[in-house]
Amino acid sequence: MTDRYAAIDGATKRYGEIVAVDNVSLSLMSGEVYSLVGANGAGKSTLMRMLVGITEPDAGRLSICGEDLSSGGPSTRRHLGYLPEELVLYERLTGKEYLELVAGLKDADTARITEELNFFELLPAQNKLVGGYSLGMRKKLGLAAAMIGSPKVLVLDEPLNGLDVEMMRKLRHRIEDERSNGKALLVASHVMSFVERISDRVGIMRLGKLVAEGSPSELRVLAGMNDAQFEDVFFHFAG
Amino acid sequence: MLFAGIYVKHSLLLIGASTRSLLRWARQHVYAWLILAPVVLGISYFTIIRLAENLPDWEFSLPLALTLASLFNLGLIGLSLSRASAEIYHPRRPESYFDVLPISATTHLHSALVTRVARTAAVSAAVLIARAAFGDTGLLRARDIPLFLCFTLLTSLCEMLGALNWIHWGHTRNPRTAVPAFLVLLVNGALGGLFLTMIFRPSSFSSRFVLLLCAGSVIWIFLVYAVVHKLNARWRRSDLEYARRLQSATRSTFRIELALERRLAPVVAAQFARDVRLTIRAFSSAVYVVFAIAALCCAALIAALTTDWLPVVLHKTAWLDVTWLPQIITLKVACVFALVSLTSLLPVLIAYELPHMWLERAAGTSGLDLLRAKICYARFLTSPIPIIFWCAGLLTGSVPFLYAVPLLAECLWLWWLVSSLIGALSFEMPLRPDLAIIVNGTLGLALGLVAAALWPVGLIVYPQAMHSLTARGRQRARYYMITEAE
């Protein structure tokens, strides 16, 4: 039997008149990759921010590894690794110093820092100030920070932005490895080929609602488009 | 104990990262710190000392001193709201990532409090220096230390209490929490004012009173800390998102381009409209600061004109000599100070826009267009100043009726001169806005004050200075646009 690592139950978030997330429920199992797809403004990032606890839902319940996010203390977040869509970094810390800081705040093993720097090809730049990093290097540093501490739940918002083809491939393999290690991953992306290849389940969001959910093959069947590209299946549901 | 250890460790890590980042920033600006700062501070200090020695002895009554000190303290709290809330909620700052890490709200609060105490301590130190300059007492005496500590801690906590309530009020509009907080802030403002008065006028208070007040304040400080701690723990999660969205919220606007397209080239009008919109939407807390300083200049002018601080000229003055009456000179000097204060926003605006200047580059904007937009902006931003100060002079009855129109012309001339000069200097050092504020402000003040005393000098300087500054400014604007400040 699989463990439920993250659960979102009836989450709703409004910004004035706009309903960013409308009564969405989903769960993340151990060893599962769940991808969220949708147009800009569909509510993917808001849902992810609610799951990591930086946006408070107006209604609904969210939990990580069985611990309620609203009532649980900061220790609830020890199971989480998060890559935000917009990552603001200390411009005057080096990449290595930044990861040491994150590891310290997570009470994680600092020995993993070198491994992560090596994996994300940041070792040659580890002692350079982050202010001199390119967009791709910043994204890789953010990914490394999310992975530090081996969190059970990884929430990655647009992880491919700024990465080169080789790193995209490496990241895909890394996500598959994390899944094999029993982690649960929630990924938001606009790259349909990537989503199709890595996902066990895909949730399609439209105007704050989860309009369809299932494995890529199940979604094809639901759409009645067995031989179509996954991108066409997405457009079928997302309009 | 284990939890306490983790809190301390996390707080130290956060403070350590910020400090390291700050030290590296200081190292990058070592020239400004080691050469320019001592020169500017030294000149300012000796000028103030000289002024203090030459000014007549002012002795405020105790109630007036208490009122002024309380207003100063409340002003300090008000001006810190934006910065203090950024320290607590860190929108668009690197620390924002740490909200998803297993760190308690208390850790965030403590690291913000340390930063706030450090900033307030700098203000307290400036107060002590001012006292040493204007009073007969030394820089620091043993009796000042508890007063200094109480003032710093109390004001820091009040700034944090104000920031927490400011964000919460914006989010919830709940008067049941806002009104008590406002009352507490008023009480604390008065208490902080009392500490300031005790620092400035130690002879007015007995040692016993000072001792009792300090002891009582320690208990009060703990109570305020407990309230701040509780409010932060209770509101942080719900207010965090609101604080982060403050800058991205939809704000009211007005169509400036339509009014200006007829007068300005479209390229200049578009940039100008953007600059004005950014200012209206408070792109930086510096917007509040410069407007507050300009308002203080106006308040100081009204105070000077309505009290007996200025000497009264008893003999009859010729019509043209009115320009040198103490009241008229004071009005023009205050006008120049307010103009320089508002134009200090230019370097901050350019530093804010520099990373996005690829847009102008891609659109084929010329260096001259860039410079013209900034000169227009400087003139527009400061345009109300001459009218406001002229009105203040008329309403206080300090301006002879026959000199009202020439005075308006003088004020308008000062406005045009100072705003054009500082606008033309916009691109002199855009990578160092702090230094640019000092240099541009000093030049603007120098020319403005000379023109205030002898307006024809401006007529001689303006055409020559503007010609060469425009030629230089367009080159520099083009350079920074092409290099995108690399």
Image: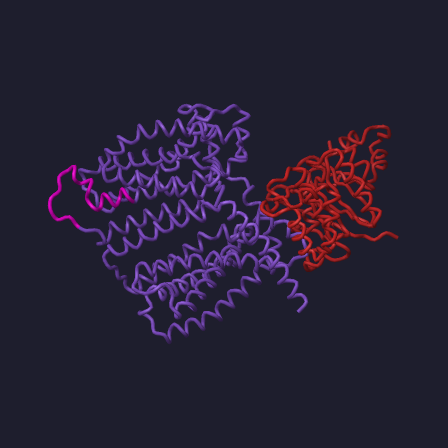
- Which residue sits furthest bottom? B208
In the image, B128 versus B260, the foreground residue is B128
**Residue B324 appears in which quarter of the rendering?**
top left
**Quarter location, residue A89:** top right
The colour with which the image depicts chain B is purple
Instruction: Answer whether residue B413 is magenta in the image.
Output: no
**Residue at position x 71%, y 48% from top?**
A146
Tell me residue A103's x, y (percent).
Answer: 69, 54
Q: Which of B260 and B328 is in front in this view?
A: B328
Q: Can residue B375 be seen by looking at this rendering?
A: yes
Residue B450's place in the image compared with B141, above or below, is: above
Q: In this view, does A191 lie above or below B200?
A: above
Relative image position of residue B283 (x, y in whole percent) = 49, 41
Does residue B294 lie above or below A103 as drawn? above
Magenta span of residues? B312-333
Q: Position of residue A209 (x, y in %)?
A: 72, 41
Q: Where, by quadrant of the figure, is residue B372 drawn?
A: top left
Q: In this view, does B361 lie to the left or right of B211?
A: right
Q: Residue at x 24, y 59 (%)?
A: B57
Check the rendered structure and report the hue given to chain A. Answer: red
Residue B315 within the magenta-colored segment of the rendering: yes
Between B416 and A148, the residue placed more toward the observer is: A148
User: How was this image coloured?
Assistant: by chain
On screen, residue B151 above or below B303: below
In front of the other: B180 or A152: A152
B345 sits left or right of B384 in the view: right
Q: Which residue lies furthest to the right in this view?
A: A1
Q: Do we see residue B397 in this rendering?
A: no
Count of numbered circles on the image: 0
